[in-house]
């Protein structure tokens, strides 16, 4: 039995040959078949033939466009080509709709799959990664091109083509943004600074890990009742862990570490004691120390910093150095006992001044600490071979510790807990290289940690008090609300705050920053390349919505 397409072709041939009787018979048969209920092939056949049709659509669209370009520039025969291709394409599509789809306009999955396969090179060419806005733009461009590679079946060609491109671009923008979110969910883009902080034992908040707009949004939410309290607790916890990491950097050279949970002034005192003990132990193997030229240069450099303080403080620094170092030397040489006494007294004086509430006193204490460090450097230069490593390790620890101690002395470092910006300022201030060259290059002592913290963590000074008590009060809203003692809206607001509990914050960090392997990268890239296929899938729905 002949198909509808074969009968229509035969009718056109009969009309062209002037066979009126044959044409009448064929027309009657066509009318009869059009009145018959259409039967659709099985799902498997529909799908296979749909894929073939979908693969052919971009080719048909290209024929339509190029024939019109030819007509526009006046190529011979181009007008006939326009009519021929329009008629051929529409006839084949009508036959496909009738013979394959059974006259129904339901979702054609097979044809859609063919379209996606045909436009796969466009998807492959689209860049992945970047911001959500960039992904949306890429999706709009890719899906707009893919939308334009669909044949026009009815209406004015240019108008319909613009609709195809426009609806494809709109659908692609939405699909690109969604694909970007999916890709980031599979493998969040985590900065090197976040990875470094996590390796140091610091767990940033979710917003700090994701950065950008997420961090800004989290900062704004920190002023929202209930949830804001939880966010601030999480930020404070990360800052305290950052402090612990910085102090542990100072203790690492002598193979020591802070007791867990030790922060603020308690951590500073603990580190000073441990480093002092390590240095005393190292000094026991060191003989007499000469007050060499380099020591004089180092002490003059420290005095240059002190000169900005009030005159009485600057003069006091000179007297302390003269008393503890100059007066103890005999013929410009410090005996081991004299060296230990000078080093110990300078450390005691420095710690005393550093605890003062007066800013100038704390700065004087910091300068004394630098003088102590200069004396220790002289010991390292002159120490016997066997003792040199121990002295060098103690000096390396003190070099880190000086930065931490100065940061803890700044105004605003409440209870000795400093933020990343304060540590960065201390790192820069104590860079002794000419014109702060090492800081400018980014390799000053402790600068890698301070810069990572400054880029990732909040630069607000953390509140004093125990985070756990604040959090306990926050979470108490749940059971109290259940008893009718607290508004349910407050209790509901506390739920997102669970992300900022110690367990929740750690879990979120693992979720957001933990999947960084090659497999996750491949899956993330594949997900972000769904922008164009997703745009093609959304386009029919968008066109249907617009046409209503």
Image (cartoon, grey):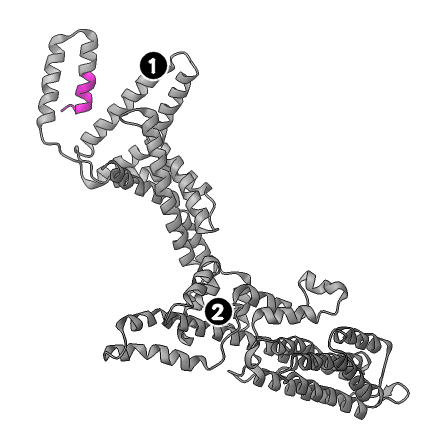
Is 335 located above or below residue 492 in the figure?
below
Query: In this view of the protein, which residue sits in the foreground, 397 or 106?
Result: 397
Is 375 located above or below residue 210 in the figure?
below
Q: Going 64% across and 69% down the picture, which residue do you hit?
A: 425
Residue 426 location, x and y as percent?
Answer: 65, 72
Q: Are marks 2 and 1 in contact (CB under 8 Å)?
A: no
- Where are the magenta residues, as a range? 1-10
Q: Which mark is residue 204?
A: 2
Q: CA distance from mark 2 to mark 1?
A: 68 Å
Magenta stretch: helix, strand or loop mostly: helix
Q: Which mark is residue 80?
A: 1
Residue 530 seen in this snapshot: no
Residue 160 occupies quadrant = top left
* Residue at the outermost right position: 331
Residue 249 occupies quadrant = bottom right
Residue 40 occupies quadrant = top left
């Amino acid at each position: 039995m002949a198909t509808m397409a074969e009968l229509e072709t035969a009718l056109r041939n009969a009309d062209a040959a002037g066979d009126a009787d044959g044409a009448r018979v064929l027309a009657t048969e066509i009318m009869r078949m059009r009145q018959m209920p259409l039967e659709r092939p099985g799902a498997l056949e529909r799908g296979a033939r749909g894929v073939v049709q979908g693969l052919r659509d971009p080719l048909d669209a290209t024929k339509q466009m190029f024939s019109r370009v030819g007509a526009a520039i006046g190529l011979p025969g181009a007008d006939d080509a326009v009519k021929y291709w329009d008629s051929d394409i529409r006839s084949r599509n009508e036959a496909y709709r009738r013979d394959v789809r059974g006259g129904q306009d339901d979702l054609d999955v097979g044809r859609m799959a063919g379209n996606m396969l045909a436009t796969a090179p466009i998807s492959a060419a689209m860049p992945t990664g970047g911001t959500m806005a960039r992904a949306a733009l890429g999706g709009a461009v890719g899906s707009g091109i893919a939308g334009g590679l669909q044949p026009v079946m009815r209406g004015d060609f240019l108008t319909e083509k613009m609709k195809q491109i426009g609806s494809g671009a709109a659908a692609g923008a939405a699909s690109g943004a969604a694909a970007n979110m999916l890709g980031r969910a599979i493998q969040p883009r985590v900065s090197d600074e976040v990875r470094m902080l996590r390796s140091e034992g610091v767990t940033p908040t979710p917003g700090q890990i994701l950065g950008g707009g997420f961090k800004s949004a989290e900062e704004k939410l920190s002023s929202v009742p209930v949830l804001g309290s939880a966010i601030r607790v999480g930020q404070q916890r990360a800052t305290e862990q950052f402090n612990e990491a910085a102090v542990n950097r100072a203790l690492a050279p002598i193979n020591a570490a802070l007791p867990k949970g030790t922060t603020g002034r308690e951590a500073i005192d603990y580190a000073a004691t441990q480093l002092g003990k390590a240095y005393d132990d190292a000094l026991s193997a060191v003989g007499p120390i000469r007050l060499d030229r380099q020591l004089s240069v180092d002490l003059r450099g420290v005095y240059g910093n002190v000169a900005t303080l009030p005159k009485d403080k600057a003069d006091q620094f000179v007297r302390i150095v003269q008393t503890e170092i100059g007066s103890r030397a005999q013929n410009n040489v410090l005996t081991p006992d004299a060296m230990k006494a000078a080093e110990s007294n300078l450390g005691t004086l420095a710690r005393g001044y550093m605890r003062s509430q007066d800013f100038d006193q704390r700065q004087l204490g910091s300068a004394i600490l630098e003088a102590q460090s200069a004396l220790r450097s002289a010991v390292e230069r002159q120490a016997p071979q066997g003792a040199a490593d121990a002295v060098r390790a103690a000096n390396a620890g003190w070099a880190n510790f000086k930065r931490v101690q100065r940061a803890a002395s700044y105004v605003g470092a409440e209870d000795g807990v400093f933020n990343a910006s304060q540590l960065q300022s201390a790192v820069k201030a104590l860079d002794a290289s000419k014109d702060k060259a090492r800081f400018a290059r980014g390799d000053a002592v402790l600068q890698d940690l301070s810069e990572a913290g400054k880029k990732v963590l909040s630069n607000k000074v953390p509140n004093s008090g125990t985070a756990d008590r604040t959090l306990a009060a926050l979470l108490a809203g749940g059971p109290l609300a259940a008893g009718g003692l607290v508004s349910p809206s407050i209790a509901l607001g506390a739920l997102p705050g669970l992300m900022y509990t110690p367990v929740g914050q750690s879990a979120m960090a693992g979720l957001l920053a933990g999947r960084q392997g090659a497999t996750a990268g491949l899956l993330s890239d594949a997900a972000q390349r769904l922008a164009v296929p997703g745009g093609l899938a959304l386009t029919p729905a968008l066109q249907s919505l617009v046409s209503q």
